[in-house]
Image (tube, grey):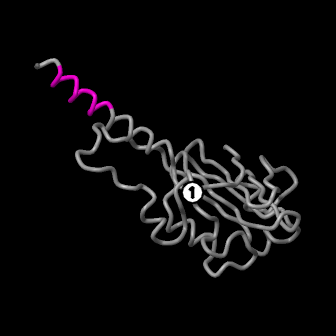
Amino acid sequence: MAFSSFSSNGLAFLLLLAMALVDSARGCVFYAGGKDGWVLHPSESYGHWAERNRFQVNDSIVFKYKKGEDSVLVVAEQDFDSCDVSNPIRKLDGGDSRFVFERSGPFFFVSGAPGRCERGQKLAVVVMAVRRPRWPPAGPASDPCFFATSMGTSVSASASSVGDFAA
């Protein structure tokens, strides 16, 4: 009898632990610029938008733009500062593009369309390290994307249909 009770409790603990780990690996999906998308003059500056969001490892950022009219370049910090688009680390040019943050630290994005970076279409994002709790929470898991989702800037990663590009 004691063995079956231990097995049930042990199984429940392992299930809660697995759910917590899967939840932390899922990440959130953020839309660059919020409702405006990846445009030259968003209603909220990209800097302000990035400051009020919290990005973590495994989160994604989606850049919404028309294929052939714009692109997104991942660049080094010095190229971001000077708007040098000649040596991108990665180019996203297929239309609505998703970039996955696979590490913590700063990331720098600029428009690939001529002159747009110089006119402000660029975004710097700082990704925080993953912090896992020592023990799974006692109650139901809270949605790590809730605040951003309620502000209209992100959705669950499982709902995304755009291409993946990892860091």
Residue lying furthest bottom: 43
Q: Point out residue 6 in the picture as x, y percentages from the top left corner.
A: 17, 23
Front residue of this view, candidates 154 and 76 = 154
- For residue 138, side relative to residue 158 (left or right): left
Q: Point out residue 140 in the picture as x, y percentages from the top left corner.
A: 29, 50
Q: Which residues are magenta?
A: 4-14
Q: Residue at x 67, y 51 (%)?
A: 99
Front residue of this view, candidates 7 and 44 = 7
Quadrant (top left, top right, bottom left, bottom right) of the C terminus: top right
- For residue 50, side relative to residue 121 (left or right): left
Q: Residues within 10 Å of mark 1 (few under 14, many from 20)?
A: many
Q: Residue at x 27, y 45 (%)?
A: 137
Residue 56 colored in magenta in the image:
no
Quadrant (top left, top right, bottom left, bottom right) of the N terminus: top left
In this view, 33 is above or below 20 = below
- For residue 110, side relative to residue 125 (left or right): right
Front residue of this view, candidates 76 and 51 = 51
Task: Tell me the element at label 1.
Answer: strand
Label the magenta part by its dominant secondary structure.
Answer: helix
Q: Point out residue 89 in the picture as x, y percentages from the top left corner.
A: 78, 46
Give, as a three-letter code, the residue at label 1.
Val
Count up the numbered dots: 1
Q: Residue at x 60, y 58 (%)?
A: 125
Residue on which the image places disc 1: 29
Q: Point out residue 145 in the picture as x, y percentages from the top left corner.
A: 46, 58
Q: Residue at x 31, y 38 (%)?
A: 16
Image quadrant where residue 44 sits: bottom right
Front residue of this view, candidates 129 and 165 = 165
Residue lying furthest left: 1
